[in-house]
Amino acid sequence: MRAMTDQWRGPVLVTGTDTEVGKTVVTAAITAAAQAAGLRVAVVKPGQTGTTAGVPGDVEAVTRLAAPMTGRTLASFPDPLAPLAAARVAGMPPLELYSAVDAVREEADKHDLVLVEGAGGLLVPMGLRPSGEPWTVADLAVSLGAPAVVVARAGLGTLNHTALTLEALDRRAVPAGVVIGAWPATPELVHWANLGDLLPNLLGALPAGAGAMDPGVFRRSAPGWLTPALYGVLDDWRAWADEIS
């Protein structure tokens, strides 16, 4: 299910088909494109895990690349696990669903767009409800009434993982679109075949290695990786394919 352009305001969830698919760099690209279009953008990370002293987290990475007006991490846990498991292992209080909802809504009152970057995939346990039941990124999207950007891989296996994620969102009435997190410099047959299948839901594609770019180059380039629905200028996939092939 693909959202209309005017739905990509207020809170917007950035999730992925799995971990390490490029959610943070895609969040930065949307931030850069939206700010270039004149929007006030906030980035919120509900649960950051695997934190190490001196190593920047995801919000810091987005800030370096795209400099959002506001960047917030609501809870950080030292172990590289799902946020609920990381809180339990560390003996720390888990993130409560409605505290996260309130924090995002607070930023939505002050910004045009609030990008909420999840952890791992859509159904990763993030924290606990007041009832003591676990909640997921999908639950956060429903509670916020937010659409979702699904970051997907370009290669083998992505069609199944993307379809499962989109189906889970559709069952919850969450509008969604897809961005390829890292399009290879030398695409193979599988990448082109997957691109064709993803096109009906595709809202953008970032080049592999985009996160290592100079921030100035990243910000100038980001609109070219995203369609107008996400404040970019990519409006012809055939021309895009001809340019990079």
Image (cartoon, rainbow, N blue to C red):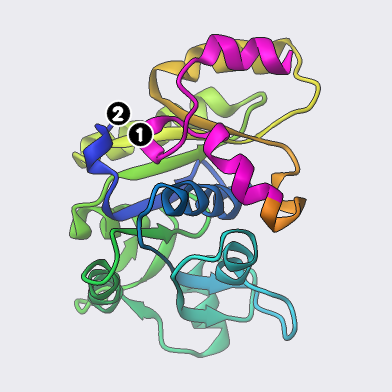
Q: Which of 203 and 153 is in front in this view?
A: 203
Label located before the other in sequence (2 or 1): 2
Q: Is residue 155 above or below residue 20?
A: above
Direction from residue 81 to residue 215 in the image, left or right: right
- What SS does tag 1 mark? helix
180 drawn magenta: no
Q: Where is residue 127 in the image (x, y as percent from the top left)?
A: 37, 72
Which residue bears the numbered disc 1?
Answer: 229
Residue 21 in view in this figure: no
Q: Which mark, residue 219?
A: none
Front disc: 2 or 1: 1
Extent of the magenta region:
217-245
Residue at figure coordinates x 37%, y 78% from the top left? 95
The residue shown at (66%, 49%) is 218
Left or right: where 147 falls relative to 183:
left
Q: Residue at x 27, y 35 (%)?
A: 5
Q: Hey, which residue is sitting farthest right in the picture?
A: 186
- Closest to the observer, 112 or 177: 112
Residue situated in front as seen by the camera: 171 or 176: 176
How dense is the environment of label 1, judged by Cα within 10 Å: few (below 14), some, or many (20 and up)?
Answer: some
130 vs 65, nearest the viewer: 65
Query: Given contact means CB atoms under 8 Å apart, are the residues at marks 2 and 1 in contact?
Result: yes
Q: Is residue 225 magenta?
A: yes
**Is label 2 in a helix, a strand or a loop?**
loop
x and y, in percent, of residue 63 in the image: 58, 67
Percent position of residue 162, x then y: 47, 31
Quadrant location of the N terminus in the rendered image = top left
Three-letter amino acid code at the position of disc 2 = Arg
